[in-house]
Image: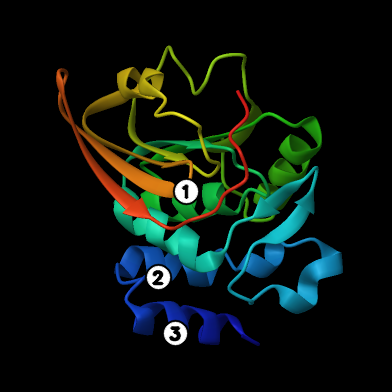
Amino acid sequence: MNSLQELIDSMVIAGTLHTPAIIDAFYKMDRKYFVPEAFREHMYVDAPLPIGNDQTISQPSTVAFMLEKLEPKEGDKVLDIGSGSGWTTALLCQIVGEKGSVVGLERMDALVKQGQENLSQFHFDSRCRIEKAGEKLGMPDEQFDRILASASADEIPEELFSQLKVGGILVIPVRNSIFKFTKVSEDNIEREEFYGFVFVPLIY
């Protein structure tokens, strides 16, 4: 792919990307602003790229797939675990709009700084931010409409279910699958599994 348009067209044609608000976010939060200078010639290739610290900016079609499963809406309160370059945080900020909020969490200091600098290009206010992750997974004292994790857990991290509001959705890779969990009620979590993905490991 040599252009953003070609990349987006390829994902739309494949059926990976279809929601207008998510497509719009891919245009406005151009991946080129989140790819390190050394890899700029590959910025529209549908592949993960290194961002330092043995981490990657995810493959665009995988990000599109996960966002479509997450179903973020205007006004949602979203938690983005493993924000890395800040790209997914920025995409989510664009989708939820001024009435929503997004917190990106990242464990590595260098990537916290990189993500914050990348996000600052778009002049989002404090409703969209990246923070250093705490010792526990997620933000245990808060609840969210949507939770996205961009790194792979070994087991389903059930502690995140209590951080979801009823009606909320968690999308997270576990080993080589992507799982979508929907909190139907306090006692009922529906799950869907989608096979065949590769992610860097989730550290917590």
Tag 1 residue: 176
Q: Is residue 198 above or below residue 18?
A: above
Residue type beneath disc 2: Ile
Query: If the image is split into quadrants, where does the N terminus sit?
Result: bottom right
Is mark 2 in CB contact (under 8 Å) with mark 3?
Answer: no
> Would you say residue 34 is visible in this rendering?
no
The spot of residue 128 in percent (x, y) is 53, 40
Mark 1 vs mark 2, foreground winner is: 1
Tell me which residue sits at (36%, 71%) in the image.
16
- In the picture, measured across the screen, residue 90 lies left or right of residue 36, that is left
Residue type beneath disc 3: Asp
Is label 1 in a helix, a strand or a loop? loop
Front residue of 105/57: it is 57
Tag 2 residue: 23
Tag 3 residue: 9
Mark 2 vs mark 3, foreground winner is: 3
Front residue of 140/56: it is 56
Residue type beneath disc 1: Asn
The spot of residue 96 in percent (x, y) is 38, 48
Residue 186 is marked as: none
Whole-number angstrom distance, CA of label 1 to CA of label 3: 26 Å
